[in-house]
Amino acid sequence: MQTYLSVDRIENNLAVCELDDRTVQNIPLSHLPDNVQEGDILCLCNGEYIIDKQETMRRRNEALKLLKSLME
């Protein structure tokens, strides 16, 4: 089973991440890919964090649709 985390923010060389149940987890940037940024979805696969670009884009598009519907 894969674990997915959402990067909420980056501060003090840590990525503050949330699991789907809103559990906060601080992960040192040294354990993450160099190009990680706020809003990315990370997958913990075989003990290594990778950026799931497809899931990141899906969630960003979902958030944009919600924002547009609220603005109408």
Image (cartoon, grey):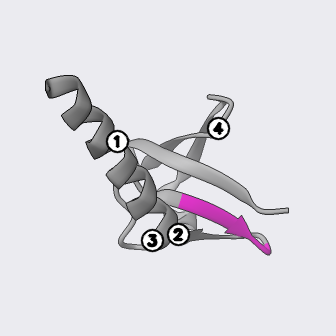
Q: Residue at x 43, y 51 (%)?
A: 59
Q: CA distance from mark 1 to mark 3?
A: 15 Å
Give the secondary structure at mark 3.
helix
Image side of residue 48 versus residue 17, left or right: right
Q: Amino acid at mark 2?
A: Asp
Per the picture, the main secondary structure of the magenta-coloured stretch is strand
Decide which of tag 1 and tag 3 comes sooner along the chain. 3
Residue 61 is situated, as x and y percent measured from the top left of the image, at 33, 53
Q: Amino acid at mark 1?
A: Ala
> Which disc is residue 53 wearing?
3
Q: CA distance from mark 4 to mark 3?
A: 17 Å
Image side of residue 25 versus residue 32, left or right: right
Magenta-tinted stretch: 42-46
- Residue nearest the viewer, comparing 18 with 56: 56
Q: CA distance from mark 2 to mark 3?
A: 4 Å
Q: Residues within 10 Å of mark 1 (few under 14, many from 20)?
A: few
Q: Residues within 10 Å of mark 2 (few under 14, many from 20)?
A: some
Asked whether residue 7 is drawn in magenta, I would say no
Image quarter of the C terminus: top left
Give the secondary structure at mark 1.
helix
